[in-house]
Image: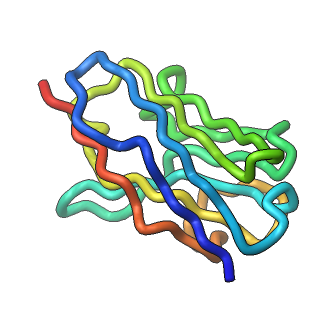
Amino acid sequence: QVQLVESGGGLVQAGGSLRLSCAASGRTFSAYAMGWFRQAPGKEREFVASISWSGASTYYADSVKGRFTISRDNAKNTMYLQMNSLKPEDTAVYYCAQRGGGVAYTDSRKYDYWGRGTQVTVSS
């Protein structure tokens, strides 16, 4: 079955950087679009970024545009999220997700498989 495992979260000061990774297994990684979502305490899960099967198309939430970069390495079955200029409002559990097609979407309902998440905490 499909497994998604996030890593790279942690505690960082405002203005700092982190790189999240999502290692996938269970089916042909290169065929499917991927996404990052996050959920802060007391809030609903929200879209962060997504990437098409080839990496040619990427999408970002307005709140992270210009600061975060999504990428993937299909040879390593891994997706990444480079997060720069982090702000306290970026504090959340970050989840990676995979959908059953190659086109990337911003809607979490389009994604079939989810990881367990990794905590990112940004201190002020």
- Residue depicted at 58% across the width and 29% down the height: 69
Relative side of 89 to 103, left or right: left
Q: Is residue 98 left or right of residue 81?
A: right
Quarter of the image containing the C terminus? top left
- Its colouring scheme is rainbow
- In the rendered image, residue 45, in percent from the top left (x then y), is placed at 38, 62
Q: How many marks?
A: 0
Q: Is residue 83 above or below residue 4?
A: above
Figure quadrant of the N terminus: bottom right
Q: Residue at x 54, y 37 (%)?
A: 81
Q: Position of residue 16 (x, y in %)?
A: 31, 19
Reply above or below: 11 against 114. Answer: above
* Displayed quadrant of residue 102: bottom right
Position of 36 compared to 40: left or right?
right
For the point 47% across and 33% down, the residue is 19
Q: Does 16 sit above or below residue 3?
A: above
